[in-house]
Image: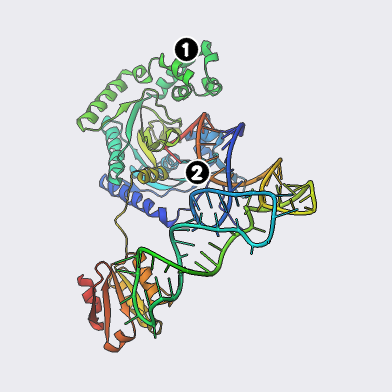
Amino acid sequence: MKYEKLRGVKDVLPRESFLWEYVVKKAIEILKRYNFSLIIIPTIEEENLFIRSIGDATDIVLKEIYNFLDKKGRKIALRPEGTASVVRAFIESSGEFKDFFYLGQMFRYDKPQKGRDREFYQIGVESFGVDSEYKDIEIIKLAKDILDNIGIKSYEIQINNIGTKEDQKNYSKKIKDYLSNKKEKLCPDCIKKLERAPLRILDCKNESCTELVKNIEPICSFITKDLKERYEKMKNILTDLNIKFTENKNLVRGLDYYTGLVFEFVTQKLGPQQNTILAGGRYNDLVEELGGKKTPATGFAMGIERICEVLKTENFSLESESPDIFIIYDKNYIKEAFLLLCSLRDAKVKTVMSFEENSFKSQMRQANKLSSKFALIIGEEEIKMQKYSLKNMKDGTQIQIDKKEIINKIKER
RNA sequence: GUGGGCGUAGCUCAGAGGUUAGAGCAUCAGGUUGUGGCCCUGGGGGCCGCGGGUUCAACUCCCGUCGCCCACCCCA
């Protein structure tokens, strides 16, 4: 084979792309109901936008940015996530619109693995301007409604509150103080994190790190009183709404811009390495950090590939998209067949025919394979009688219909 | 980025230092000169991932490379 796809990217062929269409369609149904509007953002941005927003100590920025120099030597990056661009667009458009959703591919230069490509698809949501527990709940319910509408059954909602930037700074210091004389029990990665990003030691999977961390007071009880009260209120309302959730006191996110509420929707269906199918949280400081007016904001993103994988494990099947009519013709009458094909399609009937001029038998086999509802036959006899034969593929019955009435008759069925 | 496994037909996989490399499924055609599913018969399709080395001889052994998978890490 002369050309092969690049490492970490993929073609989504029709045997799978119908799932994508379905997921996107179902998500948009709900997003419209919540009055969120589509924003189309560029795939490329100045690299600095991502460094500033995601954080220069995060793995995404440190090792996964897909960057290059353009023809004028500017540092450009393919977007590794959508929030930074939406915030930039929000600022540039002077806050005219507030509730957005986006969909498209993201790029991270990782070593490819199951559930982790260099190019992958996300649907994301961002909402600006409101800082209240009701907005937080709306966003969680929106996420839940989308997954439910898609038909995902097995997931758990995990929440945590990581406080303001100030809280995080104080808490990080607390972690550092507590762990600095216990370094020998930490894994090598966490020793590095101790200086750079102490919060992230909390979600290390290494056993001895987890043990150590258990003894630290959780961040959600460390945060300021106002935030704590609001967090409790929010949990109560979630319970009133019958939305089940679990608190994961070690849940911190891998992007620096989060403040306050964070959440992940986790599935057991895909194995521990790709079990987060949707994640997000509040980021009240980011708009200001990127040069806008101080504006509270919150949002989430979901991974389409992972959603599709979960659907596959849940024996999901779509209502068939089979054609209504398959036209079978004698090759002398291909033109007549083709004209009829066009008229039927104009009349909004899903119609198919083969252009290969092969045998009746072969055409019937194709009609069967596509599970077409009817076969419409144009042969020698039909032409003589000025009628077409219409065969019901389910029960095998066949009737003849006058040429001139064919479209009306078919539409009646 | 680190460690391990694997690359043979469209798919799932068998095989083996020595003539034309196999099976099932898929595909196409025929059995029925104008009619599907089941059945039967046949056809097409492989630089045995790529490059190099060892050998009289490599798809098989060795090295490299690329790709996939798994674990760590990270994330959606």
Q: Residue at x 37, y 78 (%)?
A: A338
Residue A410 can be seen, yes or no? yes
Left or right, residue A401 beside residue B31: left
Q: Which residue is mark 1?
A: A178
Q: Residue furthest top?
A: A181
- Helix, strand or loop at mark 2: loop
Q: Give yes or no for contact between labels 2 and 1 (Cβ–Cβ under 8 Å).
A: no
Q: Is residue B19 above or below residue A77?
A: below
- Helix, strand or loop at mark 1: helix
Residue A352 can be seen, yes or no? no
Splitting the image into 4 quarters, where does residue A278 fall?
top left
Q: Nearer the viewer, residue A186 or A251?
A: A186
Across and down, in percent, residue A343 comes to: 31, 76
Q: Nearer the viewer, residue A354 or A245?
A: A354
Q: Amino acid at mark 2?
A: Asp
- In the picture, which quadrant includes the N terminus of chain A? bottom right
Q: Nearer the viewer, residue A310 or A22?
A: A310
Q: Nearer the viewer, residue A267 or A331?
A: A331
Q: Residue at x 26, y 66 (%)?
A: A394
Across and down, in percent, residue B22 comes to: 55, 58
Q: Which residue is mark 2?
A: A117
Q: Amino acid at mark 1?
A: Tyr
Q: Residue at x 54, y 39 (%)?
A: A110
Across and down, in percent, residue A310 comes to: 37, 42
- In the picture, which quadrant includes the C terminus of chain A? bottom left
Have a look at marks 2 and 1 and say if they share a chain. yes
